[in-house]
């Protein structure tokens, strides 16, 4: 049985196109506010980051074990390395399932800034590249360089995904929250409580003053954001939070920012 001809590349390329497009199409919606889960993480965004980080660690082992399998390492190839490579690959898949679920079906495609745009793009391409790699492995006997190139592409996209999301998030967590600025006198916090209810902020956020227990976005009692922080986030959205700039008036946004920034408290 010889090597397949390059015409067979049509199969993985088709898988790549079909899976990338499907992921892109399925994720073409506004962020949804229901059916998230967070397991033992503080919120679904940290759950995504945790599983993505595990996937990256496993992927590093994938590259390492692949190099061993193809005898690129100075040591003898042990018998367990093939199954270890296969099983770590399957575990990568298990790790990306909860991530994919939230990215594709809940948060959706985001392109408001270059980070989320790059992340959305890497994400859709990743599913295509993963499908292409599996196709190549399953069909066997491709020309020698095809598999390492496909594997390398999957790995590169995964690192890109992780860099634009989890690593970014952990850096955000590490940087201290800016000092609170007082709400301007023109803003009406009592009216802001109504805006909070009407806009459905509570579906995604916990805020004791509004008796809400949403757990999609950060807990606002813990975060205690400043007036300006809330105002900007509500107006512009981003990172899984919908933008309300076109749905709420400027005064309503000021009011809800005054409400959240003055009434959020820990405990
Ligand atoms: C569909 C779910 C959803 C809804 C609805 C929603 N948010 Fe968010 N919100 C999020 C997510 C997810 C984040 C985290 C975004 C990030 O990490 O950049 C967030 C972040 C925030 C932050 C933190 C900003 C910061 O600087 O860290 C504030 C404040 C906030 N939202 C307020 C609101 C208010 C007020 C409303 C209602 C007008 C609202 N949110 C509606 C999901 C939502």
Image (cartoon, rainbow, N blue to C red):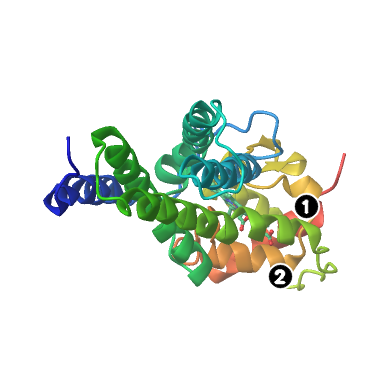
Pointer 1 local density, CA inside 10 Å: few below 14, some 14–19, many at least 20: some
Q: Earlier in the sequence, mark 1 or mark 2?
A: 1
Pointer 2 local density, CA inside 10 Å: few below 14, some 14–19, many at least 20: some
Q: Is mark 1 within 8 Å of ligand 1?
A: yes
Of tags 1 and 2, the one toward the viewer is 1
Question: What percent of the width, then of the height, locates residue 111?
Answer: 43, 65
Q: Is residue 147 left or right of residue 159?
A: left
Q: Is residue 30 in view?
A: no
Q: Residue at x 46, y 34 (%)?
A: 93
Residue 43 vertical placement versus 263 (above, below): above
Q: Is residue 190 left or right of residue 86?
A: right
**Which of 8 and 27 lies nearest the eye of the viewer?**
8
Q: Is mark 2 within 8 Å of ligand 1?
A: no
Dot 2 corresponds to which residue?
A: 228
**Disc on res. 223:** 1
Q: Residue at x 64, y 38 (%)?
A: 215
Question: What percent of the width, then of the height, locates residue 60?
Answer: 58, 47
Question: What percent of the width, then of the height, locates residue 65?
Answer: 54, 41
Separation (CA) of disc 1 from disc 2: 13 Å
Tag 1's secondary structure?
helix
């Amino acid at each position: 049985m010889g090597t397949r001809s390059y015409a067979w590349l049509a199969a993985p390329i088709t898988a790549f196109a079909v899976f990338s497009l499907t992921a892109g199409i399925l994720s073409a919606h506004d962020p949804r506010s229901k059916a998230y889960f967070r397991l033992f993480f503080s919120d679904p965004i940290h759950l995504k980051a945790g599983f993505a980080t595990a996937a990256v660690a496993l992927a590093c082992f994938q590259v390492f074990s692949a190099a061993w399998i193809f005898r690129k390492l100075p040591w003898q190839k042990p018998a367990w390395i093939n199954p270890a490579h296969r099983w770590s690959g399957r575990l990568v898949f298990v790790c990306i399932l909860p991530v994919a679920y939230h990215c594709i079906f809940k948060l959706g495609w985001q392109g408001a800034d270059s980070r989320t745009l790059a992340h959305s793009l890497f994400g859709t391409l990743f599913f295509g590249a993963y499908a292409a790699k599996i196709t190549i492995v399953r069909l066997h006997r491709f020309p020698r360089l095809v598999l390492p190139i496909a594997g390398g592409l999957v790995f590169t996209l995964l690192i890109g995904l992780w860099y634009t999301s989890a690593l970014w998030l952990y850096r955000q967590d590490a940087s201290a929250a800016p000092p609170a600025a007082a709400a301007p006198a023109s803003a009406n916090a009592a009216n802001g409580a109504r805006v909070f209810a009407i806009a459905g902020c509570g579906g995604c956020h916990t805020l004791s003053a509004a008796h809400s227990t949403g757990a999609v976005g950060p807990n606002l009692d813990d975060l205690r954001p400043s007036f300006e922080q809330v105002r900007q986030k509500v107006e512009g959205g981003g990172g899984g939070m919908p933008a309300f700039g076109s749905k709420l008036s400027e005064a309503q946004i000021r009011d809800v920012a005054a409400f959240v920034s003055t009434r959020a408290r820990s405990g």
